[in-house]
Image (tube, rainbow, N blue to C red):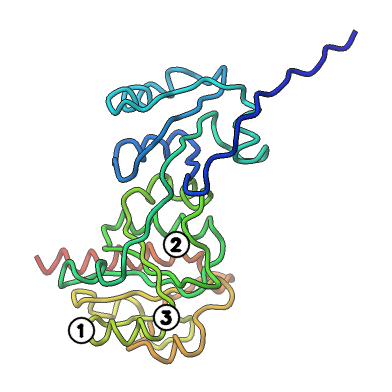
Amino acid sequence: MNKRPRKVHREERPPADTALIYGSLPVSEALRSRSRRIDHIEIADGARQHRLDEIYDLARAQNVGIRRVPRERLDQLVGQDTNHQGIVAFAAAASYVEVDDLLSGDSNALLVVLDGVEDPRNLGAVLRTVECSGADGVIIPERRAVGLTETVAKSSAGATEYVKVAKTANLNRLIEDLKARNIWVVGTSGDATMNYTEWDWKQPSALVLGAEGSGLHRLVRENCDVLVKIPMYGKIESLNVSVAAGVILFEAQRQRGEEG
C-alpha cells in the first residue's frame, strides 16, 4: 500500500522587510559580520551537524534561535531548485548606503560603478570581487539593474554583509558628481586604446563596468574621463563582468601597494 505523502508544515511567508539568506557560507558570514539583525534560522532535518557547528556557535552567542524543519519547508521558502544547503536565515532586509556616505570616506577612493547589470549572479560575483580586493564600495542604478536580492547574497558568498552598496537615480549625474569630487571616472571598453595597466590607479578612481554583451550605455561611455581595456588573447571577445572587475581592481591595488 502506498504511503500518504508527509504533510509539510506551512508557516506564514516572512514579512516584506525580511530577507532570506540561504547557504551555509552566506548565513555564517551574516552572523559573523553582525551587519544586520537576524531573527532566526531554520535548518533542514537531517542536515549534517558538523558542517553547521560554526553557525550553531555564532547563533548561540548572539541569542539567535534555530529551528529544525522539514527540508520541504525550505524548498517552499526559496524554491525547490535552489541550492539552499539545508539552511535559511530570516534577516532584516539588506540596506543600502547613501552615495554621499560612500564618497565621504577615504579621499583616495576606489569605487565600482555598474551600468545596467541585471543578472543577480553577476552582481553577487562582483560584490565578492570588490570585498576580496578591498575596494570601497559599489554604486548601482535604481532602474534597469538588479538590486540586493537573495540570489545576489548567495552568489556573493557572504560579501553582501561587508560591501557598501549605494543606488543612484541617474548614472550620468553621478559621474559628474564624482568628477566634482576629483575622482577619476574610468570606463571599460573592448575598443579602448589604453590598456588597464597603463592607467594610474593610485589616483582616486571609479571603475565603470557595463553589462555583458551590451557594455556601457553611450552617454555613460562618453561621460567617462578615460576608457581602458583588458587585452583578449583567445577567441572570445570579453570577460564576465566580475572577472573583469577582479583583473582591474587587483591591478589597482598592486599599484597602490607599490606607492606605499
The disc labelled 2 sits on which kind of residue?
Val
Quadrant of the frame with the N terminus: top right
The disc label shown at residue 243, or none: 2
CA distance for labels 1 and 3: 17 Å
**Number of the front mark, 1 or 3:** 3
* Quadrant in the rendering for residue 112: bottom left
Looking at the image, is mark 3 or mark 2 earlier in the sequence? 3
Q: Nearer the viewer, residue 125 or 46?
A: 46
The disc label shown at residue 171, or none: 3
**Number of the front mark, 2 or 1:** 1
The disc label shown at residue 182, or none: 1
CA distance for labels 2 and 1: 27 Å
Q: Please tell me whether mark 1 sits on a helix, a strand or a loop.
A: loop
Looking at the image, is mark 1 or mark 3 earlier in the sequence? 3
CA distance for labels 3 and 2: 22 Å
Q: Residue at x 42, y 41 (%)?
A: 91
**Number of the front mark, 3 or 2:** 3
Q: Are marks 2 and 1 in contact (CB under 8 Å)?
A: no
| In the image, farthest residue toward the top | 1
The disc labelled 1 sits on which kind of residue?
Asn
Q: Is residue 234 left or right of residue 101?
A: right
Q: Is residue 4 left or right of residue 131?
A: right
